[in-house]
Image: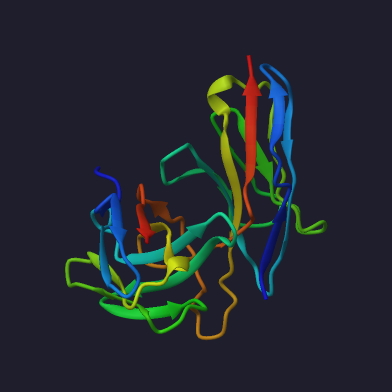
Amino acid sequence: GNSVTQMEGPVTLSEEAFLTINCTYTATGYPSLFWYVQYPGEGLQLLLKATKADDKGSNKGFEATYRKETTSFHLEKGSVQVSDSAVYFCALSDSARSGGGADGLTFGKGTHLIIQP
Amino acid sequence: KAGVTQTPRYLIKTRGQQVTLSCSPISGHRSVSWYQQTPGQGLQFLFEYFSETQRNKGNFPGRFSGRQFSNSRSEMNVSTLELGDSALYLCASSLVLSQETQYFGPGTRLLVL
């Protein structure tokens, strides 16, 4: 079946540091890949996405590149801010399920990011 | 455009009771999916509805059910509540297919005592 693996943390960085959160996946078909962010007490917000190999998703200074050869979708940001403190989820959506349906999004466990001033 | 809304935001129930949660998708979105989020299991897919029909279902017992109305609004129901059902229940909508980008609501936090 499908799965997503990411570091759980917490990951603690100083403001303006470089961020990498690793994400690798296993899928039977040709998944779309997503990063979602969850702030305390809130639902999930879409951060960025990529739908095919070598696509780069970007938003608010965050980037991730869909690497089919390494089955990875690592999240990066050049200079983090205190306001980036949140839980980040890597997820995939697989369209290859028989019958054309999909079992929703498959999520990683989430990475708790703490940015210190 | 208004986002996904969920009601109520918080609920406290006791074991054995049943509960109904509501979700209104983004206007024009026809697919609604439900997820359960717990500290132990993380985010798990419950089911997806499209055009008033359940299209996919995750690995949850039959106590968990849902439905979708003609205006795409959806409800999920949990019967005979157990302590382990305490969780944040998230609803997400997408235009047509759940493989497309899903937009999440703020969730309903359910506490079962």
Q: Residue at x 36, y 57 (%)?
A: B110
Quadrant (top left/top right/bottom left/bottom right) for the C terminus of chain A: top right
Foreground pick, A66 / A46: A46
Residue B25 spot, x, y in % from top left: 28, 57
Q: Residue B29 vs residue A32: left or right?
A: left
Q: Residue A62 vs residue B104: left or right?
A: right
Q: Residue at x 59, y 59 (%)?
A: B40
| Location of residue A6 with respect to A79 vertically, above or below | below
Quadrant (top left/top right/bottom left/bottom right) for the N terminus of chain A: bottom right
Please indicate, yes or no, whether residue B98 appears anywhere in the rendered image.
no
Residue B69 spot, x, y in % from top left: 19, 72
Residue B41 spot, x, y in % from top left: 58, 62
Please indicate, yes or no, whether residue B44 appears anywhere in the rendered image.
yes
Q: Residue furthest top?
A: A117
User: Which quadrant of the view contains residue B85?
Assistant: bottom left
User: Which quadrant of the view contains residue A86?
Assistant: top right
What colouring method underlies this structural image? rainbow
Q: Residue at x 67, y 21 (%)?
A: A79
| Location of residue A80 with respect to A102 vertically, above or below | above
| Location of residue A56 with respect to A115 vertically, above or below | below
